[in-house]
């Protein structure tokens, strides 16, 4: 498949997104941008959120990891399922009862303004860094496979992609991305299924036969029984639970779409449907990974990890499947980027600038302010992606993604303190406590061998982070309790 054909495909995909945006963003206001006027269809939101929850990194990395970890990711997925149920029946009722637009408004009402700003700040920092890193990784693949051969510079590719995302989210926000996410999730799932079907056909295997072959090659191992391992079963389950609780239930990007549904009951149905569909899609990604590792020796492919899927596609699959692969890849890219930019704009406008509390501003002035914030985050994304390219260090991107996970610990500690206790922290000290948790966790992570010997902390570091912040809030709290209004 020529680079020109792939370029035309990507361009046509952009045009389709812009048409959807034009259709859905007419007469949009701030309420449309922030929570879709509370009119989003719950089934549409659930399906579209699969694309938001996953990313271009997932599209490449989950199949690639099967060669190293087998189906061990199922341990984390079990934790995810439990976490989504907890979000549906613990956090969503809270958000609907308080009628929040930004979920960090809960922290302001329960703990104080500094707590709200601290929670919003950690979300903004984390989501900005992680979304930019993921954007860089996928744009770099597009650059290497399509645009370098056409002489298009990386900075221009990044600028055009961000400009297109800006265009279709600028007015409609959540009202628009509920629909574009549905379209993008469809493209991603179709790409996944068709590529898996081609591999089965090429190896002349049925689905059950392929699983048997994977078992014979040791690719379907699931449970890790060594307590010292970061992949130990209960560590992974517990980590998966708290990852969803913190990174979904306490994340403005995902909750912004959930609370755009009219009623709590429909929003809970949305969350349960998301759980079922997301679980099925993640299992399919692992099956695809198993198929890739069965096919690689037959085709003489030596690539492993993140490189195996693109290598098999570009070197062995027919041109039409290469097109389908890129549809799936860009479909996995854009929900994580457009949703992040919209949520960042919402949180910064509401929690930091207080746009909804400003009685001195007209609605048009609020819209203009939101537009400026949206443009600013687009510029920040561009700058960070170019920095990643300039450094050109994959380990640095991995470090950024890892460190952003630390920033959800303070959110976990803040929300847990508000929900589980009847105490109020001294608000002015909250930012310091929230900052201390990730710093201590980073020090512990860098000195695990000295502190724990052979024991290794894995994904459960998030829980430790939250516990440290929770304990710090207890130390600076008073017994008085002021109920939420």
Image (cartoon, grey):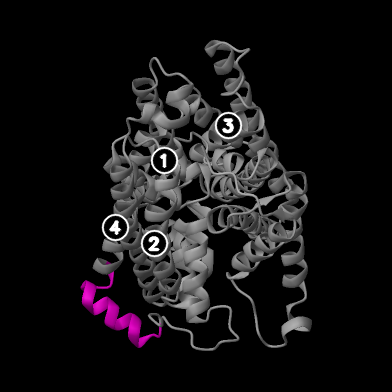
Neighbour tally class for label 2: few under 14, some 14-19, many 20 plus, Cα within 10 Å: few
Relative to 470, say whether 210 is above or below: below
Q: Secondary structure at mark 1?
A: helix
For label 3, the residue is 345
Q: What is the spatial separation of the Cα atoms under label 2 and label 1, in whole angstroms?
A: 54 Å
Q: Earlier in the sequence, mark 3 or mark 4?
A: 4
Please report contact status of discs 2 and 1: CB closer than 8 Å, yes or no: no
Judge the density around disc 4: few (<14), some (14-19), many (≥20) Cα neighbours within 10 Å: some
Nearest to viewer (mark 4 / mark 2) = 4
Identify which residue, 333 or 421, lies in the foreground. Answer: 421
Which is more foreground, mark 1 or mark 4? Answer: 1
Q: Nearer the viewer, mark 2 or mark 3?
A: 3
Q: Residue at x 38, y 26 (%)?
A: 37
N-terminal of the pair, mark 1 or mark 4, is 1
Please tell me the numbered disc located at residue 97: 1
- Range shown magenta: 202-218
Q: Label 1: few (<14), some or many (≥20) within 10 Å?
A: few
| First in sequence: mark 1 vs mark 3 | 1
Give the Cα distance between marks 2 and 3.
Answer: 42 Å
What residue is drawn where x is 68% and y is 44%?
A: 118
Q: Secondary structure at mark 2?
A: helix
Q: Nearer the viewer, mark 2 or mark 1?
A: 1
Q: Is residue 215 above or below residue 87?
A: below
- In percent of width and height, residue 185 lies at 35, 46
Describe residue 92's horizontal placement relative to residue 411 as left or right: left
């Amino acid at each position: 498949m020529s680079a020109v054909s792939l370029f035309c495909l990507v361009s046509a995909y952009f045009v389709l997104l812009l048409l959807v945006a034009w259709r859905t963003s007419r007469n949009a206001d701030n309420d449309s941008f922030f929570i879709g006027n509370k009119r989003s269809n719950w089934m549409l939101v659930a399906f579209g959120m699969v694309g938001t929850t996953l990313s271009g990194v997932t599209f490449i990395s989950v199949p690639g990891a099967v060669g190293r970890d087998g189906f061990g990711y199922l341990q984390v997925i079990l934790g995810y399922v439990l976490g989504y149920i907890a979000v549906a029946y613990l956090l969503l009722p809270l958000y609907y009862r308080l009628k929040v637009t930004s979920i960090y408004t809960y922290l302001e009402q329960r703990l104080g303004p500094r707590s709200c700003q601290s929670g919003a700040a950690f979300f903004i920092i984390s989501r900005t860094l992680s979304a930019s890193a993921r954007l860089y990784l996928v744009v770099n693949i597009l650059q290497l496979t399509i645009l370098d051969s056409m002489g298009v510079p990386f900075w221009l590719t990044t600028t055009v992609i961000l400009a297109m995302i800006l265009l279709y989210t600028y007015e409609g926000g959540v009202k628009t991305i509920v629909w574009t996410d549905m379209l993008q999730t469809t493209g991603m799932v179709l790409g996944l299924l068709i590529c898996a079907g081609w591999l089965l056909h090429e190896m002349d295997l049925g689905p059950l036969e392929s699983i048997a072959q994977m078992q014979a090659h040791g690719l379907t191992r699931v449970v890790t029984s060594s307590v010292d391992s970061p992949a130990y079963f209960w560590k992974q389950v517990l980590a998966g639970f708290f990852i969803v609780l913190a990174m979904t239930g306490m994340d403005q990007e995902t909750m912004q779409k959930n609370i755009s549904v009219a009623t709590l009951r429909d929003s809970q149905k949305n969350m349960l449907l998301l759980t079922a569909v997301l679980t099925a899609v993640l299992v399919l990604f692992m099956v695809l990974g198993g198929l890739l590792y069965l096919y690689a020796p037959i085709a003489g492919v030596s690539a492993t990890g993140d490189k195996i899927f693109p290598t098999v596609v570009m070197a062995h699959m027919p041109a039409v499947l290469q097109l389908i692969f890129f549809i799936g890849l860009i479909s996995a890219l854009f929900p994580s980027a457009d949703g992040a930019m919209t949520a960042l704009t919402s949180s910064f406008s509401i929690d930091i600038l207080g746009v909804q509390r400003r009685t001195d501003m007209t609605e048009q002035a609020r819209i203009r302010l939101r537009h400026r914030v949206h443009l600013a985050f687009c510029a920040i994304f561009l700058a960070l992606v170019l920095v990643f390219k300039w450094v050109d260090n994959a380990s640095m991107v991995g470090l950024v993604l890892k460190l952003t996970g630390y920033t959800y610990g303070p959110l976990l500690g803040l929300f847990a303190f508000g929900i589980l206790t009847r105490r109020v922290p001294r608000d002015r000290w909250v930012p310091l406590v929230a900052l201390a948790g990730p710093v201590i966790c980073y020090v512990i992570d860098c000195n695990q061998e000295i502190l724990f010997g052979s024991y290794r902390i894995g994904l459960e570091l998030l829980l430790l982070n939250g516990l440290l912040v929770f304990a710090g809030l207890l130390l600076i709290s008073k017994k008085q309790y002021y109920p939420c209004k």
